[in-house]
Image (tube, rainbow, N blue to C red):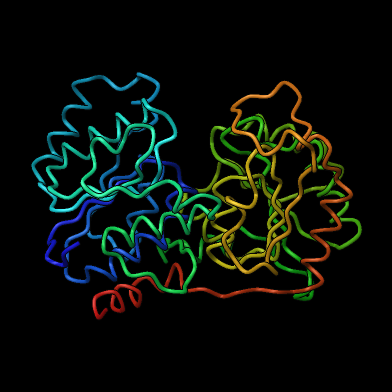
Amino acid sequence: MTQAFQKILIVLTAGIGDLILASKGIRSIRKGYPGAEIHLLTSTAAAPLARHYPYVDFVWPFPIREWKTGKLRFIELLGVMKKLHRRRSDLAVNLYAADSPAGAFRMGCLLMLSGAAERVGVDGKGLGHFLTKKVHPSRLSGRHVADAMVEIARSAGGVADDRGIEVFWDPAVEEHCRRLLPARAFGRQPLVGINPGGNRRNRRWSPENFAATADRLIEKEGAAIVLLGGPSETDIAEAFLHGLRHDVVNLSGKLGLDELACVVSRLDVLITNDSAPMHIAAAVGTPQVTLFGPEDAAVFHPYTDPGLYEIACADISCRPCRKDECGQPLCLDLVTPDSVFEKCRRLLRAGNRTIRPHGSAIEEEKRSASRA
């Protein structure tokens, strides 16, 4: 793989959490090609955060969810592809392995339309037909998804480092987020975030269980509770609030992505389902208790220091699995509020935090990247 590439397209048309997991791989490509113009094609949902990454020069929002569900009109898709083709990248790198033949075909079309003579990705589900350099799936087997993406980046000429994943946000939101959060009693009141939402129903612990855990944290630890969630999760937030005995700070549906990342960075502990806030917490060094349902925690666990997270899941024979739906998700239903409370209390008592560069450190990161 030559170092002569001047224009590089990184393809990561997945969710917000996947963008954060890919940050280490994206940084590797920047280190391998410090003088190149790097474009990132990512999902419409992840694009607002992607624009803050100092390793990327241009961000292309792509409506991947609409494409998958057939809601994207062909004329709109054609317009995006024409713009992509006019950029004529020298190298295109797909950082995420295709999970189906249909997904591989869609990804292959995007890579071909980039005009790149060199196309790198994982040889699986038929995507290999579109690639000039193939990463065999066996090289990624059993590895954490963040490390797997770094391996793909290295195959494309990236240079890995020993730093973790990252998330960045607009420093202008810092003061607003400070005002949203409760003042801590005598400076000692622990601030605990609750994220009961998530993309898939079988990845979500019940709102009632989250509420029972929150009440106990308030009663036993004197915690201030901050409810998080996206605009589409109001029903989940309402179910959580209905099950509470105490008041909490309700920020569900009220935060943009920049504000969400900033708020998570200020928490003492986050309790969350397997979702984007889990990866945000890992990136900023916030301790967390993560509820894991069907996914394999060995591959998808919070990519952070082991002392900064606790996994809550039921040890049953049918997990991990790749089901999108489950009539009886025992892997989550068997997890008790008492067990989650105890895990959260251990993290609060440990008082561990890892401060990583983010948010207001964007400009320094950009300067560092330009010097690399």
Q: Could you tell whether 80 is left or right of 217 in the image?
A: left
Q: Could you tell whether 30 is left or right of 241 in the image?
A: left
Residue under the point 38% across and 38% down: 124
Which quadrant would the C terminus be assigned to in this image?
bottom left
**Residue 278 locus on image (x, y percent):** 60, 53
Q: Could you tell whether 3 is left or right of 210 in the image?
A: left
**Residue 34 locus on image (x, y percent):** 22, 71
Which quadrant would the N terminus be assigned to in this image?
bottom left
Residue under the point 17% across and 34% down: 81
**Can you say whether 61 is above or below 165 in the image?**
above
**Can you say whether 359 is above or below 247 in the image?**
below
- Residue 14: image quadrant is top left
Count of labels shown? 0
**Can you say whether 348 is above or below 228 in the image?**
below
In this view of the protein, which residue sits in the foreground, 215 or 11? Answer: 11
**Can you say whether 33 is above or below 315 in the image?**
below
In this view of the protein, which residue sits in the foreground, 233 or 44? Answer: 44
- Residue 178: image quadrant is bottom right
Residue under the point 10% across and 47% down: 88
In this view of the protein, which residue sits in the foreground, 337 or 12? Answer: 12
Q: Could you tell whether 185 is left or right of 5 in the image?
A: right
In this view of the protein, which residue sits in the foreground, 232 or 27? Answer: 27
**Residue 281 locus on image (x, y percent):** 59, 59
Residue under the point 29% across and 42% down: 61
**Residue 15 locus on image (x, y percent):** 45, 42
